[in-house]
Amino acid sequence: MSDNATKKKIDIFDTTLRDGEQSPGASMNQEEKLEIAKQLAQLNVDVIEAGFPVSSQGDFDSVYAIAEQVQGPTICALARALEKDIEAAAKALAPAQRKRIHTFIATSPIHMEFKLKMNPEQVLEKAAAMIKYARKLVDEVEFSAEDACRSEKDFLFRIIETAIDAGASIINIPDTVGYTTPEEFGALIADIKKNVPNISKAKISVHCHNDLGLAVANSLAAVKNGAEQVECTINGIGERAGNASLEEIVMILKTRSEFGYYTDVATPQIIRSSKLVSSITGIMVQPNKAIVGSNAFAHESGIHQDGMLKNKKTYEIIDLGDIGLKSTQLPLGPRSGKHAIKSRLEQLGFKTIEGDDLQKIYERFIRLADKKKRVDDRDLISLATDLSITMKDSQNTFNLLHVQVTCGTSGLPTASICLQDQRDKTNILKGAALGTGPVDAACKCIRELTKANCTLTEFSIKAVTEGIDSLGEVTIRIMDNDSGQLFTGHSAKTDILVASAHAYVDAVNKYFAKKGDLKFNPQTSNEAEEEKAVI
Ligand code: KIV
Ligand code: ZN
């Protein structure tokens, strides 16, 4: 009998691409969302909330592309309780094998009075009508009572009962403002089970925000009181202080299996997923973040190190292999073979790297091993992630040939850059620029040479490992001054100034790729453009 046979399955509903994208600075383009959605399918989440199709053409297209290309999880789209939102969601989900519309309306007195300007009876009626409408378009409808934790309980019970009668099979209880506490939230879920007569016809889901740092604890309390689905995001990103973190929820249920729950998440894909999301969004994970932070398994004190040497379990409650991180130092060096790198990448969750991609990582690995004293799994993950999220050389408009920067306490920071135009390889662009610092000078020079009409909106840099010889990962975001669209560039190198120039060129290449790719999409609803929807 499997270990899980006596346990209760908890569905993992990932909303990295919807609520996660609402984190300040986290907006992603279609290719980036698709890359993350494919990784979420590898992670084996049950549901991917792919976006909010009515909110913009870009969101509509991203949900459509994910519905078309990502198999395995149910693909879900968000819609307010409005016909046009629900229609856009249904259209965007059309190609998905398994689809769900997630419709919501606020139920707290403050939201109903000030935001919706509706009375409770109107809210009740609207919810029922829109759930019925959504059920005509798709088989599975989730209903959320927005701001449930500040709603009057009797009204909440009534609207849940009405929603289930109207055809919702998943009832989500969001703590929209991150206000509740574990005891209170657990009791709310227990009360819903006790007081909603038809609750057995639906699954209870929870969606907790982290304003008081309790999102994961609240979600766990809900599970212990009968919730069967948890909504969460990779690295806990999301609106304001974020959402419950997927990796924490999943690893709590796995590590404390005596609680009697399990998920279907492929936990060895956790580190890879975390890395991909932070590299794409540029939102770095704090070093002491549980499960995925760089210090989460670092043992600093002598007493702890001594204990670890005697028995790992003295101070480590999670087997690193379970989250896709091997604890051992890579027994690889400048003379290691390609096969050894491939097999290590597979152990780290990168199962599909072959051919030219493998050759490229191999060459970069060997160059790195020549420069750096110790190369470990984190370096290899960084190189592989970099390869998966930067543009392929063959698709580039520009390649960076040389970068030279001068800076210091006297004189002006100066960069000289040499680029090759891939549309006409004889066209070599050379230039120099001054800047407020060396990175600014390099970016300015690249912008002037390529004539990209864009503005740098974000720059972040992170050391992959400890030590002065660490790889530096740079994420750069630029905004197209015409369309407002954002493009993210990435690079990982031991020289952070060179990495910055490469990351900027990567972002500029994505910008030019989009400029040449403004296709008409016949699936797109005109209504999606009518109004910018805000949650
Ligand atoms: O936090 C919230 O209430 C939401 C809903 C749309 C589910 O994100
Ligand atoms: Zn939310």
Image (cartoon, grey):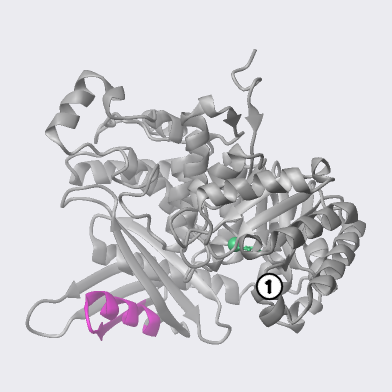
Query: Residue 179, image x and y in percent?
Result: 52, 62
Query: Residue 163, image x and y in percent?
Result: 83, 57
Residue lying at 90% horizontally and 63% vertically, measured from the top left: 133
Residue lying at 70% horizontally and 79% vertically, measured from the top left: 113
Q: Is residue 23 magenta?
A: no
Residue indicated by mark 1: 109
Q: On the picture, is 37 further left or further right than 321?
A: right
Instruction: Name, please, the residue furthest toward the right.
Output: 136
Q: Quadrant of the N terminus?
A: top right
Q: Is residue 505 above or below residue 244?
A: below
The answer to which quarter of the image holds residue 402 is bottom left
Q: Is residue 256 above or below residue 36?
A: above
Residue lying at 10% horizontally and 76% vertically, measured from the top left: 408
Q: Is residue 434 magenta?
A: yes
Instruction: Name, please, the residue furthest toward the left.
Output: 410
Query: Residue 454, image x and y in percent?
Result: 46, 83
Of 133 and 470, nearer the camera is 133
The answer to which quarter of the image holds residue 66 is bottom right
Q: On the picture, is 525 further left or further right than 429?
A: right
Is there any visible trace of residue 49 in the rendered image? yes
The boundaries of the magenta stretch are 429-448
Of 258 and 511, nearer the camera is 258
Q: Secondary structure at mark 1?
A: helix
Of 162 and 40, nearer the camera is 162
